[in-house]
Image (tube, rainbow, N blue to C red):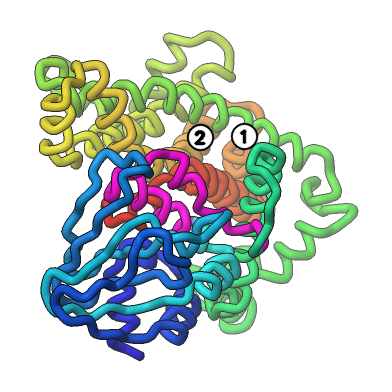
Amino acid sequence: MEQVERLLKRTLPFQVVSPETLDGIAEISRHEVFKAGQVIYGAGQPAEEVYVLVSGRVAHRIDPDIKARVHEKELQVGDVFGWAAILEGEKVRLADVACIEAAEVLKIDGARLLELLRKDVNFGEAALKSFSQLISQQYYLPPSVSERVPTTLSKVGDTRTPASNEAEPQTASAWTLTMYRASAWLKSPDPYLMMVGFALMLGFWYLTVEVLKLPRFEDLPGLTTVVKEWFAEDPVYGMSIYTAEYYQHIWVSIRRVAIAFLLATVLGVPLGLFLGWSRSFREYVFPVFELLRPIPILAWVPLAIIMFSGSETPVIFLTFLASFFATALNTMLGVESIDESYTRAAACLGANRWQVFKEVIVPGSMPYVFTGLQISVGVAWFSLVAGEMVSGQYGLGYVINTSYTMVRYPTIIIGMVTLGIVGYTTSAMVRVAGNYMMQWRLREMALGGR
């Protein structure tokens, strides 16, 4: 069983399925040995099993009526064939398959395989899509064949036309996937370890400040004091979850970060793409970029106040700066990480410079771009606090600064914790958006394209 699972893990359509699904596929698989010259199956026969070549070599000849671009193909160890067993409609063999030399294969029941993949709501759809790409890319079959690979959410034997259900499975799949991930996270030890971590931090705070009253901690506001103030209907220092002022400060900070983050993305991503793509452009711009990037945000405060009128624009500018540099730098690194063989291959296939940029450079750099955006939104928050402390009139940074000058120490902690919660939420939103927009990576991983 372990040997079968190891083989399946190296097989393209099954590389991303869950361990439970992989175990199930191994259980419904069985070995079979064929002699040199022996026919495994012929065109027109019923298709019931999917095959994985374990050893030897096999000749795969597609029926000329199928109109494949390549009719003959020699299969190697690890190749998958017999995929007609999972196609929708009539399951009939489309090729003649015979052993060039003695071969060992793994036979997988097609109907039971479909059931297992449909139950794997997390990665089953990616495996089925990899089957479709396998058929069209490795066997050069027309879309009329590859499009017959069913989707994850459709039932076995479902005869509904794809056109009538095109939008519904996509919505259901996204929702089902989200719920599955949430359920898997709750069943894992992660949330409970997280709760233990928070409990240890709060316990340390409570012991050092309120119980032991250690030096340098005894003057800090205690845990119980902060909690009472935060959730008080009539707070001593004037701000709690029951006061409108609290939510006004949160909204102002979120609005500033959103504007700055949007500007940093719109300007930083194109700049990073061109810095990584064009050597001459990088020689002109990158030295200036690197000269300005290490300058601390607080050093820009006087110039920001001079350049921009009012109290709102300087804060947004200061928030934008750090976010912009993080976004542009990570995007540039993403472009530089792309293997030159991809751009050369595209050029050899006749792609012009703009097509290479659009089809190779932009998609290839996306993982780094979204990593940079996650860093960018976090950097934007602590840059925002610095700006609001200097020239803001509202916002969480303003609350923290004015609470210190007015000796309202519990409000300082409330502002800091709120800042952490809101900042974590925005980072999570960027991460979720990135995962949603990068689903193509999952399909590429399923085909081994890392």
Looking at the rendered structure, the secondary structure element under dot 1 is helix
Q: Secondary structure at mark 2?
A: helix
Of 64 and 89, which appears nearest the observer?
A: 64
Q: Which residues are magenta?
A: 126-155
Residue 179: image quadrant is bottom right
- Residue at the location (78% across, 38% down)? 245
Residue 291 visible within the image: no
Q: Is residue 50 above or below residue 364?
A: below
- In screen coordinates, is 54 left or right of 265? left
Density class for disc 1 (Cα within 10 Å; few <14, some 14-19, many ≥20) is many
Residue 46 horizontal/vertical position (percent):
47, 67
Can you name the residue that lies furthest to the bottom here? 1
Q: Residue at x 25, y 72 (%)?
A: 39
| Circle on res. 253 | 1
172 versus 272 height, above or below: below
Mark 2 → mark 1, Cα distance in angstroms: 8 Å
Amino acid at dot 1: Ser
> Residue 173's spot in the image, x, y percent?
63, 53
Q: Assess whether mark 1 and mark 2 are in contact (beta carbons under 8 angstroms).
A: yes
Residue drawn at point x = 58 percent, y = 58 percent: 152
Hey, which quadrant is residue 74 in on the image?
Answer: bottom left
Closer-to-camera residue (403/3) = 3
Reading the image, the residue beneath label 2 is: 384
Q: Amino acid at mark 2?
A: Leu
